[in-house]
Image (spheres, rainbow, N blue to C red):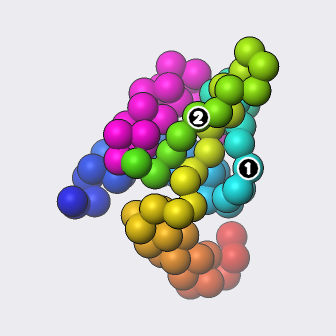
Amino acid sequence: MNLEEVFPSRAHARILDFLLENLGKGFSQRYIARVTGLSPSTVGLVVNNLQKLGIADQQNLGNVKLIFLRPETPLTRTLVSMYSQLKQIGGGS
């Protein structure tokens, strides 16, 4: 696996940043689109990619699908560690 598979676009980085910041929580596609400034269709494409990588999943809550990271996967744990280190280096921005 290489970084281009995890971060093939800025949209991937934005969505991963949001989901890592809110690890353990699920959000609708529309909400993620709103907070990241991306279109819902872009969010859908990125989430499909993250699901193929095994690090994201969706859960039905009524008629809404909640998107969340799967914290138990080795790749997610690596991303969480990297994200934490980047936050420390960047002064917690």
User: How many marks can you see?
Assistant: 2
Residue that lies at the very extreme toward the top in this rendered image: 63
Magenta residue span: 34-53
- The residue positioned 42% from the left and 43% from the top of the image is 50
- The residue positioned 52% from the left and 30% from the top of the image is 43
Q: Is residue 93 left or right of residue 77?
A: right
Residue 93 visible in image: yes
| Image quadrant where one finds the N terminus | bottom left
Which secondary structure is most common in the magenta stretch?
A: helix
For residue 58, the mark is: 2
Helix, strand or loop status at disc 2: strand
Which residue is labeled 1 in the image? 25
The amino acid type, in three-letter code, at marker 1 is Lys
In which quarter of the view is residue 22 placed? Answer: bottom right
In which quarter of the view is residue 85 placed? Answer: bottom right
The amino acid type, in three-letter code, at marker 2 is Gln
Q: Earlier in the sequence, mark 2 or mark 1?
A: 1
- The residue positioned 73% from the left and 50% from the top of the image is 25
Q: Is residue 37 left or right of residue 46?
A: right
In which quarter of the view is residue 12 placed? Answer: top left
Residue 65 x/y as whole percent: 66, 26
Query: Is 85 rendered above or below residue 61?
Result: below
Mark 2–mark 1 distance (CA, rounded to whole Å): 11 Å
Helix, strand or loop status at disc 1: loop
Q: Is residue 28 left or right of residue 62?
A: left
- The residue positioned 41% from the left and 68% from the top of the image is 74
Residue 83 x/y as whole percent: 54, 71
